[in-house]
Amino acid sequence: MRTQLAGIALRNVFKNKRRSILNMMTFAVSVFVLLMGLGMVKGQFNAIYERIIDLRTGHLKIYNKAYPAVKSTLPLDLAIDDPNAVVLAIKNVPHIKGASPRLIHDGLISNMKKKTGVLINGVDEAAEKNILTVYNNIEGSPLPVDGGQVLIGRALAKILDLKPGSPVLLFSQTVGNMNNLVDAGVSGVYSIGFDAMEKSELYVPLAFAQRLCDMENKATEIIIRLDRTNSTAEAKTAVAAILAAKFPGLTVVDWKEENADLFELAKAKMSSIGTFAGILLFLSFFIIVNTMTMSVFERTPEVGTLRAIGFDRKNVRDMFMMEGFFLSIFGVLLGYVLAAPFIYYLNVHGLVLDVMKVASNSNMPMTDVLKAYNTPSDWIMSGLVCIIAGVLGSYFPAKMASDTNIVKALQRGVR
Amino acid sequence: MKKLLLFTVVMLLAAGAGLFALDAKFDKAYAEKLLKTVDKSLYPQIFKSSLTMTTFRNGREPLAYKYEIYSKGADKSLMKIVSPARDKGKKILLNGDNLWMYMPDVSRPIRLSRKQAFMGSTFSNEDLASSGWADNYNAEITQQKGTLILLVLSAKNREVAYAKIEMWIDDNAKVPTEAVYFGLSGKAIKKMEFSNPQTIGGLVRPLDMKMVDLIEEGAYTEVKMLTMEELQSVPEYMFDQSQMGR
C-alpha cells in the first residue's frame, strides 16, 4: 500500500507540472540562499581570523598570568621579566615557526602641529617578519634593532602628513605612570589595506619602547607563529607545559581567546543568517501550504473516489504528505544543482577584492580574496530543513483532504 | 687687542653672573619652604569655588565648561558641571588616587583613567588629581631674575607624573608665574602660565591659569577662577563615589 501511495503521490507531482515547478523552485531558492549565506559568512570570518592572526595576534601569545583579565587597560606593571629566556625555552616546541617579545602600550604621536592617540608596539621587526605580515609592504626602511625610529601606517601618515624621514614626537607613560616624551623619526610607512589599524598602530624597536616605558629587559607579551593554524591546540599544550615547569607566573592564550570579541560577532552574524533562513523556510512552508491546499480543492472528487474504492483517511493524508515530501526533495536537489557551480567557484577561487581600495575602510581586516567556506554539513542541514518544511507544510492540506466527506466529494463529479 | 677681548669676556661673564646670581638665602631649606607655600596657595584646604575651563585647539571650536567645585584637603574634590546645558549634572570626583565621573543617565559612576585628558582639555586627569608637589619632589632654586626665582623640582621617585618641573615663582607674592613640566627623557611636555594673583583666605593665589600643550600646536586650556570662598566644613558624603547621584 505504501508503494502504491508513493506512486500516486509521485504521479501527482508530475501531473501538475506548473504548480510542482513553482513549489520546487521555492525550495531550490531556499537551499541556494542558505548554502551561499552560510558559506560566505563562514568564509568571511575564516578570512578575518586568518588576517588577524597574520596582522595582530599570531597563533599564540604568552602573557603574565594576571594580564589577560585586564588586557584592555594595557597594564605595564603586569609584564614578562626576561622575555628572551622564555623565547629560548619554547622555540623548539613542534610547529613553532617564530616567537618574539613585544611591549605594547598606548600613547600619542605628534608631528609638532597635530597629535593623535596610538597603540605603540615595541617589536623586534627582524624576528616578527616570520610571525606577522605587517612588515611585507613598507615604503622606506625597516625598523633598526634600537633607536628612535617609528614604523607608521599609511592612513596615519596621511592624517599627520608624514613620510619616511619625518621627525615626530612620541608620548607615553612609564611603568610608574610618569609621563615621557621622546624625539623619533619615521623609518617607514606600512600598508596593509586596513585603515583602522593603519591609523592606530605604530611600531618602534623593542629596546626603544623599553626605555620609553622605563621597562628594561621586559615585555608585555610574547607572540608566537605556528606553521599552520590547525596545530594551535597541540602547540598550546606544549607551551603551557613548559611555562608551568619553568615560568609559573606566565600563561599562554590562543588566537581564539585573543579574538573572543570577534567570535561573539561571528556568532551574532551566524544567528542573523539563521533568522534569515527561518524567514525563508517560513515562506517555503506557507507556499507549500497554499499550493497543496489548492491542490486538495482541485482534487476533491479524486479524493472522494479514492475514499470510495477503499482508501482510508490515513492513506489519503499520507499520500498528500508524500507529495509534499517529493516536491521538497526535488526542490532541494534542484537547489543543489543550481548552487553547486557557484559554491564550487566561491570555495575554490573566491571573490577577488582590491583590499587597498574596496575594504580598507572596513572595520575588520579583509583578505585580497574572499572565499566561501562550505562543509558537507551545510549541504545536509540546508536540505534537511527544506524537506522538513515541505513535509510539515503539506500536513494541514493533507489533513483537510483526509477529512473530506466522500458523498459531497463525489457529488462534484469525477474528472 | 687680546687684553681688550679678555676684558670684554670677563665683563660679560661678570654681568651674566650678576644677573643670575642667587641671594644667599635661596638655599635648599628656603626652596623646600617655598614649595610648601606654593602648594598651600594652589591647593587650599576647604573651599568652594566656581571656574570656567575653556580649551582651544587649532581648527576646532573652543570647548568651554563651567564648574562648581567643593574641595577638602589636597586630595578630595567634587566638580559639578554647571554649563553647557548638555553636560549639566555631570560630576567628577577626585578622591586620593581615584577619579570618578557621574552622569545622570548612567546609574553608577565610571572610573576614569588618570592618564586621560580631562574633559577634552590639555589637562590630564592626573594633573587635576595632583595633591601638591612638596611630598613628591625635591626643590632647588637655580636662577633669580629680580623678584622671580626659578624653582626646579626633581621627582623623588618614578611614580609621579613628571620627572622635573621648572617653576618660576614671584618671591614677593610667593605664587608661581609659570611652570614647565618635563617627562622622563627631559623633554618639556606642558607649560602652565599663572596670572591674576588675588588674596583669598589669607593667601595670594593665582586665579587664572593657562595650560599649554607643547606637543600640539595651538592647543591650550584657560582656567579662570570666578569665585572662591573658604568653608568651615564640607560633608564627607560629597566625596563618596557611591553618593555621587545625590
Image: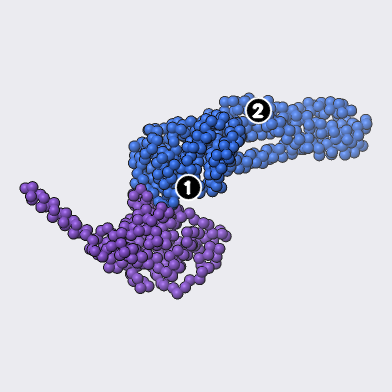
Quarter occupied by residue A319: top right
Q: Nearer the viewer, residue A172 or A100?
A: A100
Foreground mark, 2 or 1, reads 1
Q: Which mark is residue A58?
A: none
Q: Colour of chain A?
A: blue
Find residue B153 and report its horizontal and vertical position in percent: 34, 57
Q: Nearer the viewer, residue B32 or B107?
A: B32
A170 vs A222, left or right, is: left
- Amino acid type at circle 1 is Leu
For residue A234, say whether it is visible.
yes
Residue for point 41% across, 40% down: A207
Whole-number angstrom distance, CA of label 2 to CA of label 1: 52 Å
Q: Is residue A53 above or below residue A179?
A: above
Instruction: Farthest residue to the bottom: give it.
Output: B232
Residue at image mark 2: A339
- Circle 1 sits in a helix, a strand or a loop, which is it? loop
Q: Is residue B216 above or below residue B82?
A: above
Quarter occupied by residue A30: top right
Q: Quadrant location of the C terminus of chain A?
A: top right
Q: Which mark is residue A76?
A: 1
N-terminal label among 2 and 1: 1
* Chain letter matching colour purple: B
Find residue B74 and report its horizontal and vertical position in percent: 43, 65
Are the numbered discs 2 and 1 placed on the same chain, yes or no?
yes
